[in-house]
Image: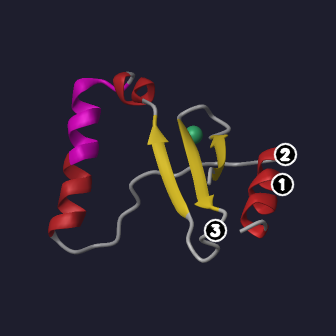
Amino acid sequence: MNPKRLCLPCSCGCSVLEASYWEDEEDEIFISYYASSFYERNLNFWDRIKRKLDFLWKILTGKEYQVYEIYLCGEDVKRFKEFVESV
Ligand SMILES: [Zn+2]
């Protein structure tokens, strides 16, 4: 059986959210996030280092951290709601 899949790009173009589930496994859903390397490549060297050190520091000190964020708006929000409701 084929999985049901929805791919939604972030409104700013930095990433893609993918959600999928198998039709015969109604209580499971897989959510993946794909970050574009384009955004990372456009940071200068020191900004990349600072960003990674901030991230590592939060992990090492047990603080909450957000790896990435995806921004959906308009028709993509409607598509996401319909997909989740179809599980
Ligand atoms: Zn974005």
Name which quarter of the figure residue 28 lies in.
bottom right
Which amino acid lies under the numbered mark 2 shown in the image of this protein? Glu
- Numbered badge on residue 78: 1
Residue 18 horizontal/vertical position (percent): 57, 48
Q: Quarter of the image containing the N terminus?
A: bottom right
Magenta region, residue range? 43-52
Which amino acid lies under the numbered mark 1 shown in the image of this protein? Lys
Q: Residue at x 72, y 65 (%)?
A: 84
Ligand 1 rendered quadrant: top right
Name which quarter of the figure residue 80 lies in.
bottom right
Q: Classify mark 2 as within 8 Å of ligand 1 or not, answering yes or no.
A: no
Magenta stretch: dominant secondary structure:
helix
Q: Residue at x 43, y 23 (%)?
A: 38
Task: Name, please, the residue furthest toward the front.
Answer: 1
Report if residue 69 lies within the magenta region: no
- Numbered badge on residue 24: 3
Residue 45 horizontal/vertical position (percent): 23, 26
- In this rendering, the answer to whether 16 lies above or below 24 is above
